Image (cartoon, rainbow, N blue to C red):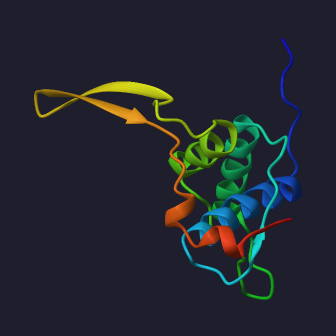
Amino acid sequence: MTFPTPMSLERALVINKALCQRYFLSNGLTNSPVLPDLTGVSLRDMLTATELVRHHNATAEPIDGKIRGYTVPDDRLVAAIYVGLHYEADDEPVTLEPVEEDGQWQIKAVAVVDVTTRVVLRDKAVPA
């Protein structure tokens, strides 16, 4: 079994920024048409990166009286971005999850659906 090597804050910031930029672009929160590349970045690395940036935000020391903080996506969003990158669009769900809510069971599906015809992003985004 191999264990991951420690990640530098610089690498964590690059991965975290790419995750945020992909979300911002897909939700119309930026005018930048650059779609950051996350090729070869594992889910473990994505989650490690965001955890390191969260830790940095919580422990950063002021420089000239200012603390620089970074936006950090929630772990669920990180997982969703990973799924979107690594699973093909399909009519079938990636997984079905039984969940009990208020004494009732629901079956929730996680799926990757092609919404190209419904999203303007395809005309705007360019790979990094």
Quarter of the image where one finds residue 127: bottom right
Q: Quadrant of the N terminus?
A: top right
Residue 70 in view, yes or no:
no
Furthest residue toward bottom: 64
Q: Is residue 35 above or below residue 2?
A: below
Of residues 79 and 67, which is closer to you in this image? 79
Where residue 109 appears, as percent x and y from the top left, is: 38, 33
Q: Quadrant of the C terminus?
A: bottom right
Of residues 25 and 11, which is closer to you in this image? 25
| Residue visible at 50% across and 45% down in the picture | 113
Quarter of the image where one finds residue 124: bottom right
Q: Is residue 115 above or below residue 89?
A: below
Q: Is residue 15 left or right of residue 75?
A: right
| Residue visible at 86% across and 38% down in the picture | 6
Furthest residue toward top: 1
| Residue visible at 47% across and 38% down in the picture | 111
